[in-house]
Image: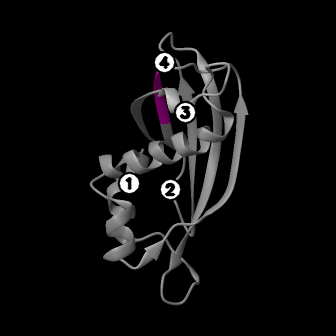
Amino acid sequence: MYCYDFQKRVRYGETDQMGYLYYGNYAQYYEIGRVEMLRSLGLTYKAIEEELGIFMPVLSLQMRYVRPARYDDLLNIRTKLKKLPDNYIVFHVEIYNENGKLVNGGSVRLCFLDAKTNKTIKAPKHLMDKLKPYFED
């Protein structure tokens, strides 16, 4: 399993009238988690797209809201890969508040798409090489 934590503070413009993180913004926090996880492995979405010619569209998003995050809360976005990707990659996300309480949790499933053919392909070798050590017994 590979796990990566990234901290993000709730900005005023991300909240609703009650001062809670607007529910629609959680998907962006999930994206922040997976982008920063890939960056922690030495990869970027930009490089995957431009250098490898691979897109990673979202196929499904599931989440549950446990308790509200509020304006100026420092949140910890914990992103996990529980299994090695194949044609698909599933990021499991848990968002915690400063007290370590779960705010939101869920998962997002993406595929690897050849930018030229628009066909689903296997995970890029470079990504697999970076991840394999975390899944060895």
State yes or no: discs 1 and 3 in contact (Cβ < 8 Å): no
Query: Please, what secondary structure does the residue beneath circle 2 have?
Result: loop
State yes or no: discs 2 and 1 in contact (Cβ < 8 Å): yes
Residue with the mark numbered 2: 84
Residue drawn at 53 percent across, 20 percent down: 71
Residue drawn at 27 percent across, 54 percent down: 42
**Residue 73 numbered tag:** 4
Q: Which dot, 3 or 2, sits closer to the camera? A: 3
Q: Amino acid at mark 4?
A: Asp
Pick whichever, 109 or 69, lies toward us: 69
Quadrant in which the C terminus is drawn: top left
At label 1, counting other C-alpha atoms closer than 10 Å, the crowd grade (few under 14, some 14-19, many 20 or more) is some
Q: Bounds of the magenta span? A: 73-78
Question: Is any part of residue 136 visible from this angle?
Answer: no
Question: Is any part of residue 91 visible from this angle?
Answer: yes
Residue with the mark numbered 1: 131
In space, the residues marked 3 and 2 are separated at their CA atoms by 33 Å
At label 4, counting other C-alpha atoms closer than 10 Å, the crowd grade (few under 14, some 14-19, many 20 or more) is some
In space, the residues marked 2 and 1 are separated at their CA atoms by 7 Å
